[in-house]
Amino acid sequence: MKKLINIFLTTLLIFVSFSMVNDQKAEAASKTMYVTATSLNVRAKATIKSKIIATVKKNTAVTVQQKKGSWSRVTVNKKIGWVSTKYLSSKKPTVPKDNNLATGLKTVDKNKQLILVTSNGFNSRSADIQTFEKNSKGEWIPVLIIKGHIGKYGFTNNMREGGASSPVGKYTIGTAFGQKTNPGTKLPYRKITSDDVWVDDPKSPLYNTWQSKKKTKGKWKSAENMTHPLYKYGFVINYNTKRTPYKGSAIFFHIGDSYTLGCTATSEANVIKILKWLDPAKKPVIIQTPIGNLNNY
């Protein structure tokens, strides 16, 4: 009997060890994949009958943490779920060979300056920032290609106050700002003082506007001080100009070396270069989108 017990315990130990090794291998196998379906359902469990908890669009980058049969476990918008592995590819979506992403855009005919902010997918915090200027022949000429950062939770089509995601879309350029004198931009420039705040209280009639702290005292319960170090230089991205409550506020292009809470950021030197280049007479716009959705513009 004792011998049988020892054999049983040894077998159990081997089984547990094998399971742990498999689990570790599953975790170690985590890698970035790209969605190939036009729209891919993310389900709560690894079965076609399970509840759909999210959807991801074509070319979106997802991190596969585990595989189970024909299913892969991924994280999408802070939700963990399962997708069909056959709609995932390890091959990164291709871009035009000349790398001129502005060529072929349909919504910028009336604009002569363009800032393009793209990421590998909705969940990416890192972004490529490119600027283009239209020549006399109507061709988009690349001006600057740099690295940047967007919201902590990447891009979103459904902005909300405090959501820490950056808005997808095409936006005009607003006021330039800084804590020092105008660095040389042609945009309207506003020098920040200790009295300057941006109201982010959705219940305030001043929501999503730049205000004087002293003059508006009692008219809001929450506002962001414009003296924040990251606002040393930047400009306003004209997002939610209708000031719809809870749809997000204070969306800027400013300096920074890490993810933001909804703005777009790059180095101070790059921000200054872009500020000096921007010309309101050329109707500049900024387009922000995952690379796979660029054809929407």
Image (cartoon, rainbow, N blue to C red):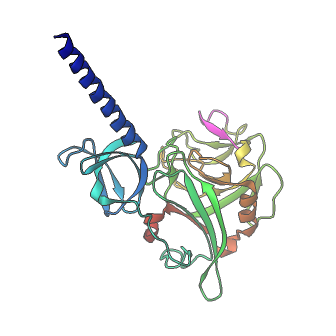
Based on the displayed image, in which of its 4 quarters is residue 56 positioned?
bottom left
x and y percent of residue 158 in the render?
43, 51
Q: Give the range drawn in magenta.
A: 217-226
1 over 30 or under it: above or below: above
x and y percent of residue 33 in the render?
40, 56
Q: Which residue is drawn at 33% across and 38% down?
A: 22
17 over 168 or under it: above or below: above
- The answer to whether residue 296 is magenta is no
Q: Which of 33 and 151 is in front in this view?
A: 33
In this rendering, the count of numbered labels is 0
204 over 120 or under it: above or below: above
Magenta: main secondary structure: loop
Q: Nearer the viewer, residue 284 or 116?
A: 116
240 to the left or right of 252: left
Q: Residue at x 51, y 48 (%)?
A: 165
x and y percent of residue 89 in the render?
36, 61
